[in-house]
Image: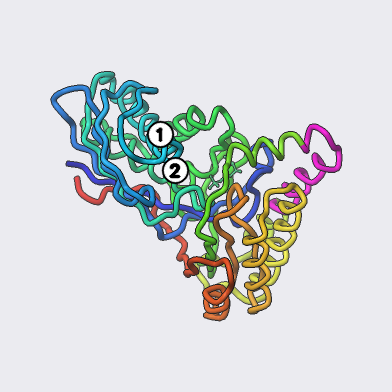
């Protein structure tokens, strides 16, 4: 039995624009998905996913992609969850050269599904790591990031960037621009997350931005401007001492860029009333900056605040289901039990 875990993430800057080759800076956070993989003697895949959906489910199927188990769970939730696990198993089988390998898989996750915190990437990264290790063919974090990206790419019909999967595999703060991915140094930024209890439809939101961008030059310029914000943010981060507590001047500069980034995402139609009201609650509480994180449409915002004020204000904000401080996860994917 092999257990691996991988972190979720917040976007400091750059979601959506990253899909069109602009840079983005996601940061891994200490909220993890844990996947257990146990090889079977047949080619079946049995999945137990207590916390992956609100209901939890246990299914057994013959491992063929597209084969749907007969269980009493909402079809869209099941399809989404099973799609990622299917894709992770396919990547692990291919990497290990064992196309008929079967597994008992269990998934546990502290990361809300589809809420902009990279839940699917964390499950896929941890799943490929656990399954390849269980077959005696461990991969490096970079290989895991690459395989996890291919898995997400397949499930999301080619609409995924490398940002979530690379960040989850490597940990820390990363910079992603097209196929170029690297870890970057940042101080331990004081992230606070607000969650509206819902989720956005990533595929539909990405498609909406793509249509706007194709129709209006100013929408295309907005995407380029998000890239400019990211470049400015990187320049600011480069001047910071990664080993010192971040100074308030640094947080103020990053916060201004986050606020600008949120405004542009909102102009591209990917915010939501609940996200805007959490963003404003954070700003009113004294956060240096606040923005939605991930695909948008619902889910999470991220704010920068070293004091307890933002977390407290969010917890009293109508429409905020959960507020928590999110430490930067310096470690990416890791083995929990060999
Ligand atoms: O909501 P998430 O965590 O899946 O992030 C989506 C980020 C996008 O830039 C909108 C898409 C992508 O694959 O980068």
Label 1's element? helix
Q: Main secondary structure of the magenta part?
A: helix
Residue at 47% of width from left, 55% of height from top? 28
Q: In the image, is 153 to the left or to the right of 217?
A: left
Q: In the image, is 150 to the left or to the right of 211?
A: left
Residue at 18% of width from left, 32% of height from top? 39
For the residues bearing labels 2 and 1, Cβ distance under 8 angstroms:
no
Give the CA distance from mark 2 to mark 1: 17 Å
Residue 118 in picture, x, y percent from top left: 48, 48
Q: Which residue is mark 2?
A: 120
Nearer to me, 226 or 71? 71
Q: Is residue 266 above or below residue 281?
A: above
Is the residue indicated by label 2 positioned so its CB lies within 8 Å of ligand 1? yes
Quadrant of the drawing holding the N terminus: top left
Q: Is residue 232 above or below residue 323?
A: above
Q: How many labels, in total? A: 2
Residue 223 among magenta residues: yes
Nearer to me, 98 or 184? 98
Residue 159 in picture, x, y percent from top left: 59, 32
Residue 33 among magenta residues: no
Q: Which residue is mark 1?
A: 143
Is the residue indicated by label 1 positioned so its CB lies within 8 Å of ligand 1? no
Coloring scheme used: rainbow
Residue 191 visible in the snapshot: no
Sequence-earlier tag: 2 or 1: 2
Nearer to me, 300 or 89? 300
Residue 6 in picture, x, y percent from top left: 37, 49
In the image, the segment drawn in magenta is: 212-230
């Amino acid at each position: 039995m092999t257990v691996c875990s991988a972190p979720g993430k917040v976007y400091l800057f750059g979601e959506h624009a990253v899909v069109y080759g602009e840079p983005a800076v996601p940061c891994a956070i200490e909220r993890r998905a844990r996947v257990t993989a146990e090889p079977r003697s047949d080619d079946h895949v049995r999945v137990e996913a207590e916390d992956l959906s609100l209901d939890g489910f246990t299914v057994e199927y013959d491992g063929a992609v597209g084969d749907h188990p007969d269980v009493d769970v909402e079809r869209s939730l099941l399809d989404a969850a099973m799609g990622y696990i299917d894709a992770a198993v396919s990547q692990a089988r291919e990497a290990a050269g064992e196309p008929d390998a079967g597994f008992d898989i269990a998934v546990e996750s502290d990361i809300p599904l589809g809420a902009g915190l990279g839940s699917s990437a964390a499950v896929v990264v941890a799943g490929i790591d656990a399954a390849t290790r269980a077959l005696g063919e461990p991969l490096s974090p970079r290989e895991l990031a690459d395989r996890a990206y291919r898995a997400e790419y397949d499930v999301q019909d080619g609409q995924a960037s490398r940002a979530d999967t690379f960040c989850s595999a490597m940990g820390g703060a990363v910079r992603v621009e097209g196929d170029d991915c690297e870890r970057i140094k940042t101080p331990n930024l004081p992230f606070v997350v607000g969650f509206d209890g819902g989720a956005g439809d990533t595929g539909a939101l990405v498609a909406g931005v793509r249509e706007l961008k194709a129709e209006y030059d100013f929408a295309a310029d907005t995407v380029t401007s998000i890239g400019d914000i990211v470049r400015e943010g990187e320049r600011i981060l480069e001047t910071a001492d990664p080993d010192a507590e971040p100074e308030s001047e640094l947080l103020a500069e990053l916060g201004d860029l986050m606020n600008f980034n949120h405004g542009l995402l909102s102009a591209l139609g990917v915010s939501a009333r609940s996200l805007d009201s959490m963003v404003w609650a954070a700003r009113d509480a004294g956060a240096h900056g606040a923005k939605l994180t991930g695909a948008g449409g619902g889910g999470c915002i991220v704010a920068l605040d070293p004091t307890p004020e933002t977390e407290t204000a969010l917890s009293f904000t109508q429409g905020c289901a959960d507020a928590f401080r999110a430490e930067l996860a310096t470690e990416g994917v890791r083995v929990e039990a060999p």
